[in-house]
Image (cartoon, grey):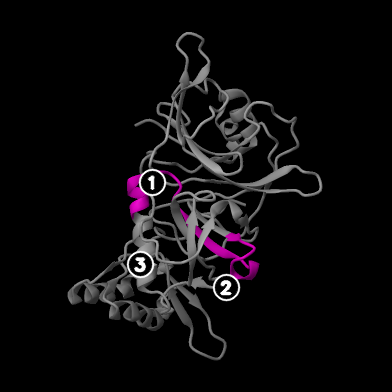
Amino acid sequence: MSSKISYILDKIWSLNSIAGWVTWKEDVTTALRMSGFGNLLKGKRDAESETSDGLDAESQKPNHQGPARGDQVATQQHCVPAMATPQQKNSNVRLLYCGFDVDEPDDSHYRFLVDGRHVKYVTIAPGVFGGIKMGERVGEPLVLGKILPPFPVGDWNDGHVAKDPVTGKATFIRTEKVQFPEVKSVWHNVKLNELDFSPHPGGRMREGVHVVTHPTVNGGEPVLMKLTVWPLENEMYYMELETAAYQWICDTGIGPKFLGHVTEGPNGRIIGFVTEWLDGTRSAEPRDLDGCKKALARLHQLGIKHGDINKYNFLVREGEGHEDEVVLIDFESARRDRPHVELEDEMKALKNSLESTDPRGGPGVVLE
């Protein structure tokens, strides 16, 4: 079994109106399982210290907004790169995400923004990086300025880079326009461009889950954004289910308030959604059994089975002089029109779920 480490890099940038420099926030997350890119292991801090663009990490504090799916361990950093000499090649391109293998036996996957509005996916064949260290493969100046060839012009969103057999240099061997999978359950009247959000410094991130702000959403206060950016059918399947589930429970108070769909770029495919951020809550404990039963019963009254009743999917907001409020989250395993016996079995399993010490499904580990 080969050792495999893969990074997911998310950069959300804002333009400094005084200096005109671009700054961005970098989040490197890792997971024990991610379909489509193999098993991911926890990223090492020294990988970030090796980056060539002078990144300085700032610590982040965790909150209890809720878990990502599966057994996941997340690391978070806020980084501001040092000023670099302006690049000529690919100067109109910005790095959004990346996933790669440290031993480079397989393709590496990158997600870029071109001209501030066009999202393009680039697959890089093994061997292109050569002896370049792991941490340097997330450095935007190095990747765009030295490793990759100039981006081809034209209407494409899926490109493949490999070494030219004659020159040995990296080249785009293919570009094409692909209809990537997207969310079809578009029921809310609000659609928001993912690029218009700004990171919230006090928010904790997991794979595809971000605490962000938007000037026109929730009065500019923090909200939760959940995305599936990689164009994988199985990943989009769960996003589709959860998006539909929020329509089923709309205006019931069972889950967070749904605030709108998220598009990939200005007019791109639907890749996620935004909900209210349940700040000031905690994960449920055995002492919250009665409140959790009431919350789950409200869901069952609609004929909906949650499907993942681990204690981290019950968020408790402690009341001052009144009963605690319990809100359900993470509906990607939810199914409706379920037989009564399935709903009964789920309710019976709730007590053991709250008493479980299994960390799976819990908040990721944030490295300070």
| Marked residue nearer the N-terminal end (2 or 1) | 1
Whether residue 349 sits left or right of residue 340 in the image: it is right
Q: In the rendering, at what x and y percent does residue 301 appear?
A: 29, 81
Residue at (55%, 28%) from the top-left corner? 151
Determine the residue positioned at 55% across, 31% down: 134
Q: Earlier in the sequence, mark 1 or mark 3?
A: 1
Q: Nearer the viewer, residue 210 or 58?
A: 210
Q: Label for residue 33?
A: 1
Question: For the N terminus, which image quadrant?
Answer: top left
Residue at 64 percent of width and 36 percent of height: 49
Residue 13 visible in the picture: yes
The amino acid type, in three-letter code, at marker 3 is Ala
Which residue lies under the disc numbered 3? 245
Q: Residue 280 shows which numbered tag?
A: 2
Are the residues flagged by discs 1 and 3 in contact, CB closer than 8 Å?
no
Say which element carries label 1. Answer: loop
Res 149 quadrant in image: top right
